[in-house]
């Protein structure tokens, strides 16, 4: 899969962006390679030069998203040790990426079960790596609690992953401000003060969250 004729080619990236838009608008199962050909301006034979099937297109969209977000997260966390700020970085990284890739976000949310075989195993491996990384950051907020962070981790993903349904750039805050508000809601509840939540986290002070002692 990784030895595609042009794995790093800019044209393939544009094809994937177009395919994501078509899948988001029509749904993966209703969309055809002809739809993607028309939308991208690339002939059918040209599409099949880059990928073998519609399923491979879906796989490459998902692989590209998870790989990009993980690589970006690793780079941004490299010089930060504070648990609260590390989680805040993850939220900002996640929201920043997906606000810039709303069609891809919808595809990842709606077409998670469409892949099979090795494609599905590969994407699930990336998802598992991301979930485990997030759970580790969530646990680090309250290492004193004998609590499985799984519930809190998926609640956090639930807060972040459906923004494409309601986010409007003309009325909702930009990515950095939105990330600060999501962080405040997650660690301090509602109504929560973001500054107080950040101060409490930095000082190691227990704060309200969905975890209860």
Image: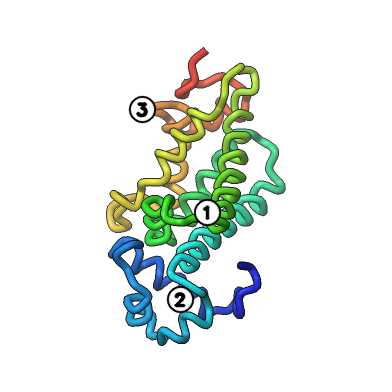
Give me the residue at 41% from left, 26% from top.
189
Q: Nearer the viewer, residue 154 or 52?
A: 52
Provide the residue designation for mark 2: 15
Q: Position of residue 33 (x, y in %)?
A: 37, 75
Provide the residue designation for mark 1: 120
Q: Nearer the viewer, residue 30 or 201?
A: 30
Provide the residue designation for mark 3: 191
Proximity of marks 3 and 1: CB atoms separated by less than 8 Å: no
The nearer-to-camera label among 3 and 2 is: 2
Badge number at residue 78: none
Lower position in the chain sequence, tag 3 or tag 2: 2
**Element under label 1?**
helix
In the displayed structure, 197 sits above or below 22; it is above
Q: Is residue 120 visible?
A: yes
Q: Position of residue 58 (x, y in %)?
A: 45, 63
Give me the residue at 40% from left, 50% from top.
109
Farthest residue toward the top? 213
- Image quadrant of residue 199? top right
Q: CA distance from mark 3 to mark 1?
A: 40 Å
Q: Is residue 86 visible?
A: no
Q: Nearer the viewer, residue 171 or 105?
A: 105
């Amino acid at each position: 899969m990784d030895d595609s004729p042009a794995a790093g080619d800019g044209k393939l990236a544009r094809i994937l962006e177009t395919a994501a838009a078509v899948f988001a608008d029509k749904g993966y199962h209703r969309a055809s390679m002809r739809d993607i050909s028309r939308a991208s301006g690339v002939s059918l034979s040209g599409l099949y030069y880059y990928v073998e099937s519609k399923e491979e297109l879906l796989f490459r969209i998902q692989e590209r998203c998870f790989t990009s977000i993980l690589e970006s997260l690793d780079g941004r966390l490299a010089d930060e040790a504070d648990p609260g700020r590390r989680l805040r970085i993850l939220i900002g990284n996640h929201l920043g990426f997906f606000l810039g890739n709303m069609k891809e976000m919808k595809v990842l949310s709606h077409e998670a079960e469409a892949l099979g075989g090795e494609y599905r195993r590969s994407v699930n491996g990336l998802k598992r790596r991301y979930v485990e990384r997030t759970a580790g950051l969530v646990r680090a907020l309250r290492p004193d609690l004998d609590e499985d962070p799984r519930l809190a981790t998926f609640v956090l993903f639930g807060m972040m992953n459906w923004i494409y349904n309601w986010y409007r750039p003309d009325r909702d805050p930009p990515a950095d401000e939105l990330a600060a508000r999501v962080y405040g809601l997650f660690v301090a509840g509602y109504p929560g003060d973001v500054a107080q939540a950040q101060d409490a986290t930095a000082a190691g002070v227990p704060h309200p969250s969905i975890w209860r002692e």
